[in-house]
Image (cartoon, rainbow, N blue to C red):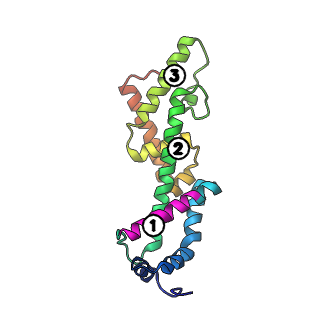
């Protein structure tokens, strides 16, 4: 195949100048690695395929717009685009779950399950619903790095190993951010007088 011996930088230059086949070579060269990086994080074949397609659409659009400026480092750049799409997906799914969190009585994604609130009277249930809503709102006041890890852990039930891989950080860093998130959440609950017993 034409261009098969070209390096990534040459392929990108040729593609930008109108040689569509150059991109096919680039895609064939890196698609398995990029797909695996997505699949490892989302653990869902259909979703991984969708995000993979989205990643390559974004890569093509960025190249065609002339906004690619990391010459010779195509793979790390492409992997970063894929990772950002995975993170965006989890952020969007968190928003959906947060809506159900504050409006649903189910305990599937209930941050308050650790508070051991018992089912009780109507007044207690109303108090519990209000408390859930307040805690969900307080999470949004946390620093972004802590907020994202807290949401992935609680709403997506992701392991610290998976979170560490998703953000390309060590497990200890992920654990540390979660610890600080919980400490700061308790401080916010105290600051805003959020009472956890009804």
Residue 122 vs 14, above or below: the answer is above
Circles 3 and 2: CB atoms closer than 8 Å: no
Q: Give whichever of discs 1 and 2 has the lower sequence position.
A: 1
Query: Which stretch is magenta?
Result: 50-65
Question: Is 190 drawn above or below residue 84 in the view shown?
Answer: above
* Residue 93: mark in rendering: 2
Residue lying at 54% horizontally and 29% vertically, measured from the top left: 112
Mark before the other along the chain sequence, 3 or 2: 2
Q: Secondary structure at mark 3?
A: helix
Label disc, if present, on residue 59 of the rendered structure: 1
Q: Is residue 17 left or right of residue 155?
A: left
The percent coordinates of residue 42 (x first, y second) are: 59, 54
* 45 displayed left or right of 88: right
Task: Examine the structure image and report whether residue 111 is included in the region drawn in magenta.
Answer: no
Q: Quadrant of residue 70?
A: bottom left
Q: Position of residue 45 (x, y in %)?
A: 64, 57
Closer to the eye: label 1 or 3: 1
Q: Is residue 34 visible?
A: yes
Mark 3 → mark 2, Cα distance in angstroms: 21 Å
Categorize mark 3 by other alpha carbons within 10 Å: few (<14), some (14-19), many (20+).
some
The image shows residue 157, relative to residue 192, as above or below, that is: below
Residue 159, placed above or below residue 12: above
* Residue at 46% across, 45% down: 148
Query: Which one is earlier in the sequence, the residue at label 1 or at label 3?
Result: 1
Q: Nearer the viewer, mark 3 or mark 2?
A: 2
Residue 166 image offset from top left, x and y in percent? 51, 56
What quarter of the picture does the N terminus occupy?
bottom right
Among the 4 quarters of the image, the one containing residue 190: top left
Assign a secondary structure to mark 1. helix
**What whole-number distance in Å separates the C-alpha atoms at marks 1 and 3?**
44 Å
- Kindly indicate whether the residue at mark 2 contacts the one at mark 1 (C-beta within 8 angstroms): no
């Amino acid at each position: 195949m034409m261009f098969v011996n070209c390096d990534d930088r040459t392929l990108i230059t040729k593609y930008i100048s109108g040689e569509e086949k150059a991109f096919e070579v680039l895609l064939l060269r890196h698609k398995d690695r990029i797909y695996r990086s997505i699949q490892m994080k989302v653990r869902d074949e259909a979703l991984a395929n969708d995000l993979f397609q989205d990643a390559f659409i974004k890569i093509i659009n960025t190249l065609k717009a002339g906004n690619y400026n990391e010459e010779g480092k195509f793979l790390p750049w492409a992997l970063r685009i894929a990772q950002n799409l995975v993170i965006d997906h989890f952020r969007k799914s968190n928003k959906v779950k947060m809506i159900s969190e504050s409006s649903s009585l189910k305990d599937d994604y209930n941050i308050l399950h650790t508070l051991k609130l018992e089912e009780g009277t109507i007044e207690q249930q109303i108090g519990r619903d209000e408390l859930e809503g307040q805690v969900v709102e307080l999470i949004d006041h946390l620093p972004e790095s802590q907020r994202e890890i807290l949401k992935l852990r609680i709403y997506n039930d992701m392991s610290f190993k998976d979170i560490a891989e998703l953000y390309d950080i060590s497990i200890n860093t992920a654990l540390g951010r979660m610890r600080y998130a919980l400490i700061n959440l308790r401080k916010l609950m105290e600051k805003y007088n959020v009472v956890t017993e009804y």
